[in-house]
Structure formats: structure tokens, C-alpha cells
Amino acid sequence: MAAGGVRAARKNAPPREDVLAAAMATIAERGLDGLTMAGLGRQVGMSSGHLLYYFGSKDELLLRTLEWSEAALGEQRRAVLSRRGPARERLHAYVDLYVPEYARDPHWTLWLEVWNRSQNAGPEERDRQAAIEGAWHRDLVALLAEGISRGEFRPVDADRFATRTRALLDGFSIQLAVGLPMLDRADILAHVREFLTESLAPLPAS
């Protein structure tokens, strides 16, 4: 694209958030296969060529949309975890934020599409995905360690326990996100809270 065309594209482009929000809504409704650059361009008033110039490919658009969505969710997570009060209450709030709201939850649909394409992803894309998941993991480890240090939770290996907890959350969340008629959200939250209570309740004094 010529320099003049690049400058014009940047001048006339809608806010980045508008493009990513439109992409997220379309992917949630139709999946990545149902998203076309031409269709997205019509929604945001850009040509498909301009979108391809900015994002390069649909897979890159998907990953950037996930990163944008995660940035907003990360702010919510940090606000939840920075509250005063028992670590147990903040742990339940973390779980509530983690689990999708309903079938085809837009945020979780993005994750499912990213995971579906992970086998063919390059090292850079895998590193970016790992960075997103790592933020959730580190925050959970820190919260568990705090609860342990304050005597609210029994002594456990915080890193290993966080890994197992997130695996449990992912399994339940995928069921809900894809709409399997097994458990509703309230049932899932009840199962997870029961697991956390049984696993983290302080041991009785000997």
C-alpha cells in the first residue's frame, strides 16, 4: 500500500475498539469461519483491504480480539482481587469472573476459537496465548498464598493447586460455553465452591 494510502487509511479508520468489538460479536454469533473481512469492514466502515493491512489475517484478528477482551477482563480481575476482606470471598469472586455467563459467551467463544487453532499456531502466537493464561494463573497463586499465610486456607502448594483449579474451571466452562445440556451456571459454581471449601478448609488443630 502506498504511503498516501496508508495515511488515508489511518485517518479514516474507526477506533480500534470498534473493530475488535464488532469482530468479537460476530465470532461469538457465527464462529471465526463465519467472519469475513468484507463483512466486518461493512460493519465498521472500512474496506477488507484496510483490515487485512492492519491485522494481516483472520487468525491474527482473532488473537488481537482475545487480547483486547482479556485486557478489560484483567482490569475487572485486579479490582476484585484488590478488595479488602477474606481471601475466600475474593476466591469465589475470581471463580465467578472466570466461568462464562451463558452458552456462547463472547469471551469464551474467542478462547474456544483460539484453542481450536493452537495446533497450527507459531511460537509467537503460542507465547501470546500463554501470557494471557499466565496472568490468570499468577493471580490465583498469589491469592491462594495470601489465604494460606493468613490461616484462611490449609497449607497447600499454591502453584499446583492453582493449576488443578484452573483445569477444573476450564472443563466446566467449556461445557457451559458450548451449550452442553449438563449443568447450568449455578450448578457449576456450586460444584467449584464445594471443591474449594473441602480442599482449602484449615485442618483442625491437633
Image: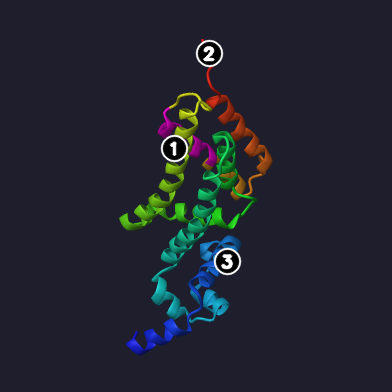
Q: Where does the magenta region start and end?
A: 157-169
Residue at label 2?
205
Image coordinates of residue 5 in percent, x first then y, are: 38, 87
In the picture of the structure, the residue carrying the numbered disc 3 is: 26
State which tag comes first along the sequence, 1 or 2. 1
The residue lying toward the viewer, choosing from 124 and 81, is 81
Q: Nearer the viewer, residue 58 or 205?
A: 205
- Displayed quadrant of residue 39: bottom right
Residue lying at 46% horizontally and 63% vertically, measured from the top left: 62
Across and down, in percent, residue 169 comes to 54, 40
Q: Of 162 and 82, which appears nearest the observer? A: 82
The secondary structure type at the circle numbered 2 is loop
| Residue occupied by mark 1 | 141
* Whole-number angstrom distance, CA of label 1 to CA of label 3: 34 Å
- What kind of element bears circle 1? helix
The amino acid type found where label 1 is placed reads Val
Q: Amino acid at mark 2?
A: Ala
Q: CA distance from mark 2 to mark 3?
A: 55 Å
- Kindly report the distance in space between the C-alpha atoms of the residues bearing marks 1 and 2: 25 Å
Tell me the chief SS of the magenta region: helix
